[in-house]
Image: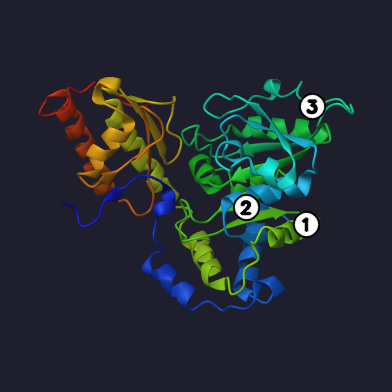
Amino acid sequence: MNARPIDLRSDTVTRPTAEMRAAMANAVVGDDVFGDDLTVNRLEARVAELLGKEAAIFVPSGTMSNQLGVRVHCSPGDELICEAECHIYYYEQAGYAQLAGVAARTVAGKEGILELDQLRELIRPEDDHQPRTRLVCLENTHNRGGGRVLPYDGVAAICAWAHEAGLRTHLDGARLFNAAVATGIPALRWSSHFDTVSVCFSKGLGAPVGSALAGTHEAIRLARRHRKLLGGGMRQAGIIAAGALWALDHHIERLAEDHAHAKYFAERVAAINGLKLQGTAIDTNIVYFRADPSLGSAESLSAHLAARDVWILPIGPQALRAVTHLDVSRAEIERAADVLEQVIGGLRGYDAPTRRDTRLV
C-alpha cells in the first residue's frame, strides 16, 4: 500500500507546500474589514495587475466570487445567459436566484463551448412581461466540459457582441491560469474582454483557501458591500492571502506539468477496454471518462480503486473524473493508470485487460 492515496478527485485537495506554509506563518496581518491587512492589500493589487483591472477583492471561495460578480451587474428581475453546465448554474445552488433574485437562461454548448450564433437571439425585448437580459457569464476552463479551454476568438466575439448590445460580461476563471498556460495567451488578455473576472487560488495553484474578483473600482466597491452581507468579510486574512501570493509567484507555470500528466492518464484510459473518454480533447488537467455498465457503476469502480489507494471521483451512474495537480507526481500518475488497468482487468476476468491501440492526438 502507498504511504498516502493518489488523490485525483479534484485539484482542490492540494496541500500547501513547506515554502507556502512558511510564507503564511510569516505573513503581516491586520483587520481586512478595516482595510488594514497589508498582505491582503498586496494580493488584491497583484490580482488587479495580473488581470488588467482597476481593483480586486479577496473572498473565501470561488462560489462567493461568482455570486458577487452576478450581484454587481444585476438587479432582481434581471436575467443572465450562461452555458447549461457551467459552475455558476450547475454547482452553486442557484445562488443567483436565492441571493440576487436573478434568473438564468442556459444554452447547451459542445463540451462547454458556446458559439456566438447560439446567443444572438437571446436578448429579451424591453417588455414589462419579461425579465431584463443584463449579463453573459462564461467559464474558462470549463469544468464539466472536461477542462476545455474556450477558443480565444470565440470569447472575444461573444464579449464584443454582449457589450455592443449593452450587456455586461463576467468570467468564471477559477482555472483561468490553466487556460493561460495551455494556450500561451496571458490571463490579462483573456480578462480584457470581461467586466469582472473571478480567479481561484485553491485549485491548480495549490493555496489552501481563497478566490478573488477583479473589475472596476465601482464594481469592487459594490462587491465589498455585498461580501459583507454574505458573511465574507474577514479579519486577519493575510495568513491565507500569503498562500495565494506564494501560489501566484511559484505555481502558475508548473500547471503545464499537470496538463502533461492528464494527457498521459487519458491516453492510458483510452487504451483500456470497457472505458471510454468523454470529450474530444484533453486541454488541461481534467479527464472525464465512462465505464461500461458490465463493469458495474462508477461508484463501485471508484470503491475498487480506493481499496488500492487510488481516489477517482464518480460523477454519474457510469461517469468518473480524474484531476491532476501539484500533489501528484508523474510516477504516481503512472501507478494510478496501472491500478486502473489492473482493476478493470480483474472486473473483466483477465489478469490484465485487453488493450486498444489508441493514442490521443
Q: On residue 123, which mark appears?
A: 3
- Residue found 48% across the figure and 79% down from its top: 26
Q: Residues within 10 Å of mark 3 (few under 14, many from 20)?
A: some
Front residue of 91/244: it is: 91
Mark 3–mark 1 CB contact (< 8 Å): no
Q: Residue placed farthest to the front in the image?
A: 98
Q: Is residue 254 visible?
A: no
Q: Which residue is mark 2?
A: 64
Q: Is residue 245 above or below residue 184?
A: below
Q: Is residue 226 visible?
A: yes
> Regarding mark 3 in the picture, which secondary structure is present there?
loop
Q: What x and y, as percent, mark residue 60?
A: 58, 59
Image quarter of residue 164: top right
- Residue found 59% across the figure and 45% down from its top: 173
Q: Residues within 10 Å of mark 2 (few under 14, many from 20)?
A: many
- Residue found 62% across the figure and 78% down from its top: 30
Q: Which residue is mark 1?
A: 222
Q: What x and y, as percent, mark residue 242?
A: 53, 69
Q: Quadrant of the C terminus?
A: top left
Q: What x and y, as percent, mark residue 142?
A: 53, 36
Left of 291 or right of it: where is 30? right
Q: What x and y, as percent, mark residue 72?
A: 76, 49
Q: Residue placed farthest to the left in the image?
A: 351
